[in-house]
Amino acid sequence: MNGYRFTFCDVACLALPSGGLYLPAYRVLCVSDLHLGKSDRIARRSGIMLPPYEVHQTLQKLEADIAATTPDTVICLGDSFDDMQAADSMDEQTSLWLAGMQAGRDWIWIEGNHDPGPLAIGGTHRAEYHIGGLAFRHIATPAPAEVSGHYHPKHRLAGRSRPAFLLDATRLILPAYGAYTGGLDCNNPALRCLFGDRLIAVLTGNKAIATPVTKTPQPAPFRGRSY
């Protein structure tokens, strides 16, 4: 699977090239920020028409990860749908496809800021979920041993920016899994302030590649002449 194996808070983890996280000891697959229905939401709100393929691309990738890891539990770490109308308007074929992936396993929908309400589809809906001493929630908190999403982190290596896992000793943030999701550079202050000095980025792509992140110096405050 060309994944990157690491230990986070005493739990063995595998960062998949797709952006999914697999915990072999617990047979758990975790993905974050699918944002299903984003093209539909943009069309409804702005009239801008994007190619409506992102749901298929995202679910196809998820189906492949489920086939490769055969998890007992799938955790969708929030913002699984771009808004609640996107969840409610999912067509029958897509609903059946998703139901097939859910069959025979526990499926946990974590609340996100885009999809905070209950979902009228299979699975269990929770604000957060705990397993193996880890807390799974959508947005990072000050708590240790936490796995979250929300920020869509990216990191630039060899001139190319890719979605990336970010981790230090106490916090792990997953990249966005959805096909139509943007990203935030890992040295953006909103992200960098969540981590200590020893930050690792695991870039997604054909192969999951781990690299240390050097903190980008912030410009010194301007101390010009007073008038």
Image: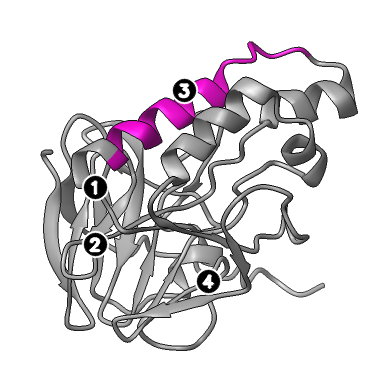
Q: CA distance from mark 4 to mark 1?
A: 22 Å
Q: Which residues are magenta?
A: 49-66
Question: What is the C-alpha distance between the residues marked 4 and 2?
Answer: 18 Å
Q: Nearer the viewer, mark 2 or mark 3?
A: 2
Are there few (<14), some (14-19), or many (20+) residues within 10 Å of tag 4?
many
Lower position in the chain sequence, tag 3 or tag 4? 3
Kindly indicate the quadrant of the structure image that contains residue 221.
Answer: bottom right
Q: What separation in Å lies between label 1 and label 3 (alpha carbons)?
A: 20 Å
Q: Are marks 1 and 2 in contact (CB under 8 Å)?
A: yes
The amino acid beneath tag 2 is Arg
Query: Residue tagged by mark 2?
Result: 27
Q: Amino acid at mark 3?
A: Gln
Residue 116 at least partly seen: yes
Tell me the CA gap for discs 3 and 4. 24 Å
Give x and y (percent) for residue 120.
Answer: 73, 49
- Label 1 to label 2: alpha-carbon separation: 8 Å
Q: In which quadrant of the rendered image does the C terminus lie?
A: bottom right
Task: Sort mark 3 into few (<14), some (14-19) or many (20+) by Cα contacts within 10 Å.
Answer: some
Mark 3 falls on what kind of element?
A: helix
Give whichever of discs 1 and 3 has the lower sequence position: 3
* Residue depth check, mark 1 versus mark 3: number of the one nearer the observer: 1
Residue designated by label 1 = 70
Residue 165 counted in the magenta span: no
In this rendering, would 6 be left or right of 189? left
Left or right? Give the position of 225 relative to 194.
right
Q: Nearer the viewer, residue 182 or 176?
A: 176
Residue occupying the point 72% across, 53% down: 119
